[in-house]
Image (spheres, grey):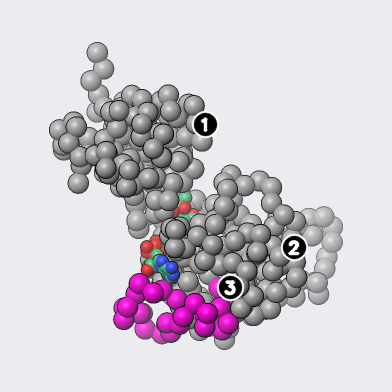
C-alpha cells in the first residue's frame, strides 16, 4: 500500500524544485490546462503545485477530497480561489518574492524595446528591410515614468528606470505615507496625464479589472507608451486596440492577456505593440526560487501537521 503523500505538479516547475521534493512524497504530473486530466488526477492528491496556467476553483476543490495544500510557484493568486480553499481547510501558499526581480527586469526590457521599436525593426530586418528612419525612437532620459501599483515589482522597476534618468511618479492608494524617496505620488488621473511611459504592477482583483479602459487611455498623452507585465484584463484590450489604432497613445508592450494562452489577437497585428507570452517570471533563477519556495511549504504542510488539520 502506498502511504506516501501524493504531490500533483500541474504546471511546469524547475528541475531544481522537482528534485527538492525528495522521496518522502510520490510526485505525479498532469497538464493543469487539460481540465478532465486535472480533475481526475487531483482526486488522489494531498498537495497541488501550480504556476499561473492552472485554474484552481470550486470544481477542482470538489474533486480533491484529500487535498491539504496548494502551492502557487509565483506571485499572483488570481488563478486560485484562496477563499474557498481556506474555507475547506486547504492551505494556500505562493512565492511572493521569488520572481519579482525577473518581472521587473522584463518590464524594463519592454519599456526599452517599445521606446526603440526593437520588435518591428528586427522583424523588418529579418524580412530584408533596412528602415532606419522608420524606426526612430525616443529617449527615456528626462521623461516621466508612471508606476501604477508601487509594490515589490513596481518599486524595482522605478529604481531601475531612475538609473536611465527618468522622473518617477506613482499611483498606489494603499501606500499611505510609505512612498520611497524620489517618487511622487499622484492620483490616477494626474499620473495618466503626466507620464510618458506608464507601467502597471497591480494584482488582478475586482477593483483592478478594467482599471485602464477607454477613459484612462484617453487621458494619456498621444506619445505615451503603456506596459503591462501584471495581469491581462487590468488593461481593457479592446479599448487599448482602439487607442493604438487611432493614435490616442503611441505604443504598448504586453506580457499578459485576458485569456491565456493567447496566440491570436488583433493587438498582434499592430506594429506599435510588443507582445510576449507571459514571460515575466521565466528565468531559471526565478523559477528555481519560486519552485523551491512552494516545495518547502508543501513539505511543511504535509509532514508538520496531522492529515486533515488545516496548515497555517
Ligand atoms: N508577468 C509575470 O510573469 C508576473 C506578473 N506578476 C503580477 O504582478 C502583480 C504585482 O506583483 P507585486 O509587485 O509583487 O505585488 P505587490 O503586492 O508587492 O504590489 C502590488 C501593489 O499594487 C497596489 N495596488 C492594489 N490595488 C491598487 C489600485 N487599485 N491602484 C493602485 N495600486 C494598487 C498595492 O497597494 C501594492 O502596493 C502580481 O499580483 C502578479 O499578478 C508578478 C510576477 C510575474
Ligand atoms: O511563471 C508563472 O507562472 C507566471 C508568473 C506570474 O505571473 C506571477 O508570479 O504572478
Q: What crowding class fits label 1: few (fewer than 14 Cα within 10 Å), some (14-19), or many (20 or more)?
A: few
Q: Which of 126 and 180 is in front in this view?
A: 180
Residue 188 placement, left or right of 61: right
Q: What crowding class fits label 2: few (fewer than 14 Cα within 10 Å), some (14-19), or many (20 or more)?
A: some
Q: In this view, does 197 lie above or below 47?
A: below
Is the residue indicated by label 3 positioned so its CB lies within 8 Å of ligand 1? no
The location of residue 106, given as percent across then percent down, is 52, 61
Query: Residue 34: which disc?
Result: 1
Residue 165 placement, left or right of 288: right
Q: Is residue 90 above or below residue 254?
A: above
- Front: mark 2 or 3: 3
Q: Is residue 182 magenta?
A: yes
Q: Which of marks 2 and 3 is nearer the N terminus?
A: 3
Q: What crowding class fits label 3: few (fewer than 14 Cα within 10 Å), some (14-19), or many (20 or more)?
A: some
Dot 2 falls on a residue whose secondary structure is loop
Q: Which residue sits at x=53%, y=69%?
A: 199
Reading the image, the residue beneath label 3 is 216
Mark pair 2, 1: CA separation: 33 Å
Mark pair 2, 3: CA separation: 22 Å
Inspect this view and state whether residue 238 appears.
yes
Q: Which of 306 and 19 is in front in this view?
A: 306
The location of residue 140, given as percent across then percent down, is 60, 79
Reading the image, the residue beneath label 2 is 271
Dot 3 falls on a residue whose secondary structure is helix
The span picked out in magenta is 171-198
- Front: mark 3 or 1: 3
Dot 1 falls on a residue whose secondary structure is loop
Contact check, label 2 and label 1, Cβ < 8 Å: no
Amino acid at each position: 500500500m502506498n502511504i506516501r503523500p501524493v504531490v500533483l505538479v500541474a504546471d511546469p516547475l524547475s528541475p531544481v524544485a522537482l528534485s527538492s521534493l525528495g522521496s518522502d512524497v510520490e510526485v505525479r504530473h498532469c497538464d493543469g490546462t487539460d481540465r478532465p486530466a486535472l480533475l481526475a488526477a487531483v482526486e488522489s492528491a494531498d498537495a497541488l503545485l501550480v504556476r499561473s496556467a492552472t485554474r484552481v476553483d470550486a470544481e477542482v476543490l470538489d474533486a480533491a477530497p484529500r487535498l491539504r495544500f496548494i502551492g502557487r510557484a509565483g506571485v499572483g493568486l488570481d488563478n486560485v480561489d484562496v477563499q474557498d480553499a481556506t474555507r475547506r481547510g486547504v492551505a494556500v501558499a505562493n512565492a511572493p518574492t521569488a520572481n519579482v526581480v525577473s518581472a521587473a527586469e522584463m518590464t524594463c526590457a519592454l519599456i526599452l524595446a517599445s521606446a526603440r521599436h526593437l520588435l518591428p525593426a528586427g522583424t523588418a530586418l529579418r524580412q530584408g528591410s533596412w528602415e532606419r528612419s522608420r524606426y526612430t525612437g525616443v529617449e527615456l532620459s528626462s521623461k516621466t515614468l508612471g508606476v501604477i501599483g508601487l509594490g515589490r515589482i513596481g518599486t524595482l522597476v522605478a529604481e531601475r528606470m531612475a538609473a536611465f534618468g527618468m522622473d518617477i511618479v506613482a499611483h498606489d492608494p494603499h501606500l499611505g505615507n510609505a512612498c520611497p524617496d524620489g517618487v511622487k505620488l499622484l492620483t490616477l488621473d494626474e499620473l495618466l496625464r503626466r507620464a510618458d511611459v506608464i507601467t502597471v504592477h497591480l494584482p488582478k482583483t475586482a477593483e483592478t479589472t478594467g482599471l485602464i479602459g477607454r477613459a484612462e487611455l484617453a487621458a494619456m498623452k498621444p506619445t505615451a507608451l503603456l506596459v503591462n507585465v501584471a495581469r491581462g484584463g487590468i488593461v481593457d484590450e479592446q479599448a487599448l486596440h482602439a487607442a493604438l489604432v487611432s493614435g490616442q497613445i503611441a505604443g504598448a508592450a504586453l506580457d499578459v492577456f485576458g485569456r491565456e494562452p493567447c496566440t491570436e489577437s488583433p493587438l498582434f497585428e499592430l506594429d506599435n505593440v510588443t507582445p510576449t507570452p507571459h514571460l515575466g517570471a521565466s528565468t531559471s533563477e526565478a523559477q528555481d526560487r519560486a519552485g523551491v519556495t512552494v516545495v518547502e511549504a508543501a513539505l511543511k504542510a504535509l509532514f508538520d501537521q496531522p492529515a486533515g488539520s488545516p496548515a497555517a
